[in-house]
Image (cartoon, rainbow, N blue to C red):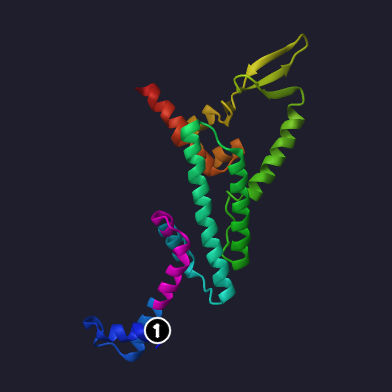
């Protein structure tokens, strides 16, 4: 007796299903079997929170009719990668809280993972609206901003102190070079207090702040919560 028949047999013994027809029992059993198959796919995650996240992501894509086995396999890969993306974001957030720095290697890993997620979404046809945080777009934006910055700041050099690792500008003047404090970095973090103040006062959106900084919106969330608000509350107290 296969699994479907076993489920049907068990359902027929239950009081709440005693008045259902054979067709209705079969439908319920098929739904139960499908859920079991999805749950089996989530066993790749040992962490309860990650397993719950994977389940919610899987449910999000249930609106799409993915009947082909190859499509289902691709969906499983997509769910897995999206969970890993969240795992990497959590790691970056912890590193920031513990060390007040962001590991560039993990940012690169996050970029690569997001690219893979985008490719799988496109393969499944579930990426109707391209997300603003797509790292391919962000990377292109950064390249454009870099070229524009080069053209408009040819006489200016941004450097990092080899002793304190602070970012500052060397501005060209007719008499000599002077070190000017950069307003776009805090330590080695990309940060501008005016941008976050405008965002805090709801004068600009999160997307606006991300575009000005040339970063993703999750980066704005990270620094707003863990840096700007903490400094603002500290001053208030």
Q: Is residue 193 above or below residue 44?
A: above
Magenta span dominant secondary structure: helix
Q: Nearer the viewer, residue 87 or 218?
A: 87
Q: Return the x and y of residue 232 as percentages of the image width and height.
A: 42, 26
Is 138 magenta? The answer is no
Alpha-carbon neighbours of circle 1 within 10 Å: few (<14), some, or many (≥20)? some
Q: Is residue 62 above or below residue 224?
A: below
Using the rendered image of the protein, determine whether residue 45 is visible from the camera's viewpoint.
yes
Residue at left offset 42%, top offset 59%: 51
Classify the position of the C terminus by image quarter.
Answer: top left
Please indicate whether residue 173 sits to the left or right of residue 179 in the image.
Answer: right
Q: Quadrant of residue 231?
A: top left
Total number of numbered labels?
1
The secondary structure type at the circle numbered 1 is helix
Residue at left offset 58%, top offset 67%: 74
Please indicate whether residue 214 sits to the left or right of residue 235 in the image.
Answer: right
Please indicate whether residue 180 sits to the left or right of residue 58 in the image.
Answer: right
**Residue positioned most to the top:** 175
Q: Which residues are magenta?
A: 33-51
Q: Return the x and y of residue 214 as percentages of the image width and height.
A: 62, 39
Q: Nearer the viewer, residue 229 or 187?
A: 187
Please indicate whether residue 233 sits to the left or right of residue 186 in the image.
Answer: left
In the picture of the structure, the residue carrying the numbered disc 1 is 4
Q: Return the x and y of residue 218 as percentages of the image width and height.
A: 52, 43
Using the rendered image of the protein, determine whether residue 200 is visible from the camera's viewpoint.
no
Residue at left offset 48%, top offset 62%: 44
Q: Is residue 161 above or below residue 14?
A: above
Q: Return the x and y of residue 48 as percentages of the image width and height.
A: 39, 56
**Residue positioned most to the bottom:** 22
Is 41 magenta? The answer is yes
Residue at left offset 73%, top offset 26%: 153
């Amino acid at each position: 007796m296969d699994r479907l028949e076993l489920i049907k047999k068990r359902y027929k013994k239950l009081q709440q299903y005693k008045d259902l027809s054979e067709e209705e029992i079969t439908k319920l059993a098929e739904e139960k079997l499908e859920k079991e198959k999805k749950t089996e796919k989530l066993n790749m995650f040992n962490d309860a929170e990650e397993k719950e996240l994977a389940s919610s992501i899987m449910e999000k894509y249930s609106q799409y009719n993915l009947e082909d086995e190859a499509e289902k396999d691709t969906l499983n890969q997509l769910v897995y990668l999206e969970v890993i993306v969240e795992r990497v974001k959590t790691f970056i957030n912890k590193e920031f809280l513990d060390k007040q720095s962001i590991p560039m290697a993990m940012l690169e890993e996050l970029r690569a993972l997001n690219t893979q997620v985008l490719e799988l979404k496109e393969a499944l046809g579930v990426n109707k609206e391209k997300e603003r945080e797509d790292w391919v777009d962000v990377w292109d934006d950064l390249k454009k901003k870099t070229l524009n910055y080069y053209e408009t700041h040819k006489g200016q050099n941004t450097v990092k102190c080899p002793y304190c690792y602070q970012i500052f500008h060397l501005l060209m003047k007719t008499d000599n070079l002077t070190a000017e404090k950069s307003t776009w970095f805090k330590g080695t973090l990309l940060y501008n207090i005016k941008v976050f103040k405008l965002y805090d006062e709801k004068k600009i959106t999160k997307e606006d702040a991300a575009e000005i900084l040339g970063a993703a919106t999750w980066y704005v969330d990270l620094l707003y919560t863990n840096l700007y608000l903490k400094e603002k509350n500290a001053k208030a107290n």
